[in-house]
Amino acid sequence: MTAQTFLLPDLGEGLTEAELVRWLVAEGDQVAVDQSIAEVETAKALVEVPSPYAGRVSALHAKAGETVGVGKALITVEHPSAAAYREEERAGAQVAQPASEGAQPAGGGSGNVLIGYGTSESGATGRKRRPRAAAPSAGARPAGRAPLVMSPLVRNLARSHGVDLHAVPATGPGGVITRADVERAAAAATPAPTAPGEHRVPMTGFRKAVSAALTRSRTEIPEATVWVDVDATALWNLRESAAAGPGLLAYIARFVVAGLQQYPVLNARIDTERQEIVTSDRINLGIAVQGERGLVVPAVIGAERMTTAQLDTEIRRLTAAAREGRTTPQEQSAGTFTLNNYGAFRVDGSAAIINHPQVAILGVGRIIDRPWVVEGRLCVRKVTQLSFVFDHRVCDGGTAAGFIRSVADAMEDPASIIARL
């Protein structure tokens, strides 16, 4: 038998560690090349780790909930020698088999690193995978097997209450730990405070990354803010007239794209080493989403090529994926400008922090009925507030005002603007 230890690979995007969320295999299991063996949570996404080796799992080198550094041992897989492997094949052993001549033999590396980080999917096909064993009954968990938690919300709840998932009896179908299971465990064993009325919760890798990014933004960027109240009645009525049409955010996104095409200096980044403003023809529109792990800003890539309907479809897909922690590293890091709909939280305004290395962010408050003067008469209109935060190094107030007014004007008279787009 030959044992090979798989080290947590370089995750890319400047990430140096990941939290092991759960194991998808247990010691003694047979695994195939490219079979997912673990789910890890990085600062950018929730991803699955595929095995580069085939054989029997002899050791798991970390527990669920632990942070594993890049280059540290993750799993050890044993596989037979070539002669023994051929003998096992003849005996009908359940081991990974090449799908065609020239395919990589068992025990060889697949070339994949992480799903979403590694090689293309086309290079990972043609492998037979051993079916996973049937899930245990409720409340039961085989010795050595990691606790089964399907929901990131449940993991976050356990983490916030300091609950060890290994000690939580599972009552869900197939031995899954539910929210109620964690709440019962938390009520039975609340962690003792370190000082009167004080509890300590370790920052996750995600929160560390957010903290570093926001600190860098506040430290490096001399930001300024402008805002304007907008009569969005016409836009509201346009949306209401087409029940199956695009949502309000998709229309606003389309107006933002048009504004950035008119003021391209705001769709940029600053090269501090060369003291240059680097603009981009491609608009990757970041959409701020409050997910289960926290605030993330995945990007609609190539928004300048999309219609309002296409933007609506992509924003909905991206938002759903972000809330589940399933956006890709590329979507997380590709943004060139951010649109923040904090009106979804029923607030009117915010002086947002620019998403470094971008140079601007536009926020949209809630749309509510307010008194408004139209042609000298007081009436009730659908009013919202736009707040625009920009890097004063790339432009002055005139450019910022021109951009926010272009978006506001489009919202106040959407029909005429859409006709010209």
Image: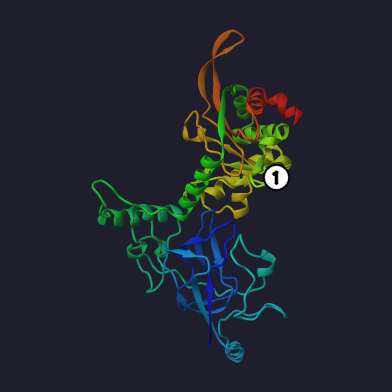
Please state the total of marks drawn on the protein image: 1
Quadrant of the image containing the C terminus: top right
Q: Which residue is mark 1?
A: 302
Is residue 245 visible to us here? no
Asked if residue 202 lies left or right of residue 347, the reply is left
x and y, in percent, of residue 98 in the image: 66, 79
Front one among 31 and 295: 295
Front one among 249 and 208: 208
Residue type at numbered disc 1: Gly
Front one among 192 and 249: 192
Front one among 233 and 206: 206
x and y, in percent, of residue 368 in the image: 51, 24
x and y, in percent, of residue 365 in the image: 52, 30
Where, by quadrant of the figure, is residue 232 drawn? top right
In this rendering, the answer to whether 315 lies above or below 163 is above
Where, by quadrant of the figure, is residue 405 drawn? top right
Residue drawn at x 39%, y 73% is: 144
